[in-house]
């Protein structure tokens, strides 16, 4: 079998990992690109045994970078979520954890030049149109990966990557509340359908007979809950103007509950076929907005002022994630201005990944 070599960086971004590549090295045609990514990750097998995927949704993610034609941005970040077993590729969502590695990867690829001890990389998330400023520690030798910042869900410490997300409202659906309501009722369950960094359907854990403190494994074993959640998610997708979402990972599903470990709220985030082992960066912003906005299913779990910024500490299965939200409430109006997080990234490997050559040049 003839194979084609594709240059790549293999990086951890936040609590996810995957290959980071130059968009120019991949097919421009979406169907051909999907075939290449399926082969690269080994999609279609629970262990991704014939590729470099890790057998979980958080390890079958792909970042494709290019110099941005946008006057504001330095780099365009195009994301793909590759299925573990279903050989499907979803280009609709973005991923905030993988985005953590975009700044370092852009520097490693030479798309951006280091400027000082901290280099600012302006990123346009192609999938959603969000703008993100990433601040990466650098030195004359390149990206600095060593540091003292720890994030729950990743062992050890590393250099911090500070992210500021802007233009995060309505990226997928065109509206903060795509159904026109802050709360809808689907199959007897109150839900808030929101589009902040990631389109989501958010509910209270208690309404499903859950505490919200269940482990990811316990939730994944609760197939009755998953069946009901998926039916609600698909109906919500239609109500949000997203059409038939049965083959898409968006909208994502989230649960909220009162905190139990000193945080602002207890959260669980679904990808959606299984529970996230920690919490998605994009999902954390949408869940935070739900907690801040009056009239949603998250309203009342904590008390907030009418103006940001405020720091929210979201409890997830592996610990806490801090999100700084800037927002304003004016009467019936609610506006998200920006969201800030500090995460870490690390380069794990670099070289060439090999895939069947058919379709690579298309």
Image (spheres, helix red, strand yellow):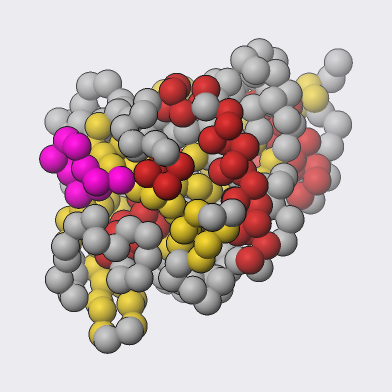
Across and down, in percent, residue 28 comes to 74, 51
Left/right placement of residue 336 relative to residue 90 reads left
Q: Nearer the viewer, residue 328 or 236?
A: 236
Residue 36 % position (x, y): 74, 34
Q: Which is nearer the eye, 72 or 211?
A: 211
Location of residue 359 by image quarter:
top right
- Outermost residue, bottom direction? 331
Of 148 and 258, the residue lying toward us: 258
Q: Which quarter of the rendered picture does the N terminus lie within?
A: top right
> For this view, does 360 lie left or right of residue 48?
right
> In percent of the image, x 31 and y 69: which residue is there?
293
Quarter of the picture containing the C terminus is top right
Q: Kindly identify the residue that appears in the image at 84 percent across and 20 percent down.
A: 2
What residue appears at the point 24 percent right and 61 percent down from the top-left corner? Answer: 300
Q: Position of residue 335 (x, y in %)?
A: 33, 76
**Magenta span contains residue 218:** no
Q: Of 125 and 1, which appears nearest the observer?
A: 125
Q: Is residue 112 visible?
A: no
Q: Main secondary structure of the magenta part?
A: loop
At a point 39% along the width and 36% down the height, the residue shown is 210
Check the image and report above or below for 35 versus 285. Answer: above
Whether residue 310 appears in this view of the structure is: yes
Q: Is residue 356 above or below residue 232?
A: above
- Find the magenta span and give its range: 257-265
């Amino acid at each position: 079998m003839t194979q084609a070599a594709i240059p790549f960086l293999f990086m951890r971004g936040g609590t996810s990992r995957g290959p980071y590549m130059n968009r120019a090295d991949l097919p421009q045609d979406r169907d051909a690109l999907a075939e290449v990514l399926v082969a690269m990750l080994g999609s279609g097998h629970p262990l991704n045994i014939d590729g470099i995927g890790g057998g979980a949704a958080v390890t079958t993610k792909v970042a494709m970078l290019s110099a941005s034609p946008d006057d504001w941005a330095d780099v365009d970040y195009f994301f793909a979520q590759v299925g573990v077993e279903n050989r499907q590729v979803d280009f609709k969502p973005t991923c905030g954890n993988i985005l953590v590695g975009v700044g370092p990867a852009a520097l490693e690829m030479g798309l951006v030049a280091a400027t000082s001890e901290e280099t600012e990389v302006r990123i346009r998330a192609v999938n959603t149109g969000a703008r993100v400023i990433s601040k990466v520690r650098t030195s004359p030798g390149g990206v600095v990966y060593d540091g003292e910042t720890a994030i729950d869900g990743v062992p050890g410490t590393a250099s911090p990557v500070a992210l500021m997300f802007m233009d995060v409202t309505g990226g997928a659906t065109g509206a903060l509340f795509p159904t026109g309501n802050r709360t809808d009722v689907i199959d007897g369950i109150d839900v808030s359908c929101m589009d902040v960094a990631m389109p989501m359907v958010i509910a209270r854990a208690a309404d499903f007979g859950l505490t919200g403190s269940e482990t990811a494994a316990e939730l994944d074993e609760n197939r009755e809950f998953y069946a009901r959640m998926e039916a609600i998610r698909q109906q919500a997708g239609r109500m949000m103007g997203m059409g038939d979402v049965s083959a898409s990972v968006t909208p994502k599903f989230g649960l909220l509950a009162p905190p139990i470990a000193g945080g602002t709220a207890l959260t669980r985030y679904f990808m959606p076929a299984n529970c996230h082992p920690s919490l998605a960066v994009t999902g954390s912003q949408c869940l935070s907005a739900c907690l801040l906005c009056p009239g949603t299913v998250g309203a009342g779990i904590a008390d907030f002022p009418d103006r940001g910024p405020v720091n929210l500490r979201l409890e997830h299965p592996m610990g806490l994630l801090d999100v700084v939200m800037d927002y304003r409430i004016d009467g019936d109006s609610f506006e998200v201005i920006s969201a800030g997080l500090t995460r870490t990234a690390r380069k794990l490997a670099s070289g060439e990944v090999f895939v069947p050559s058919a379709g690579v040049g298309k």
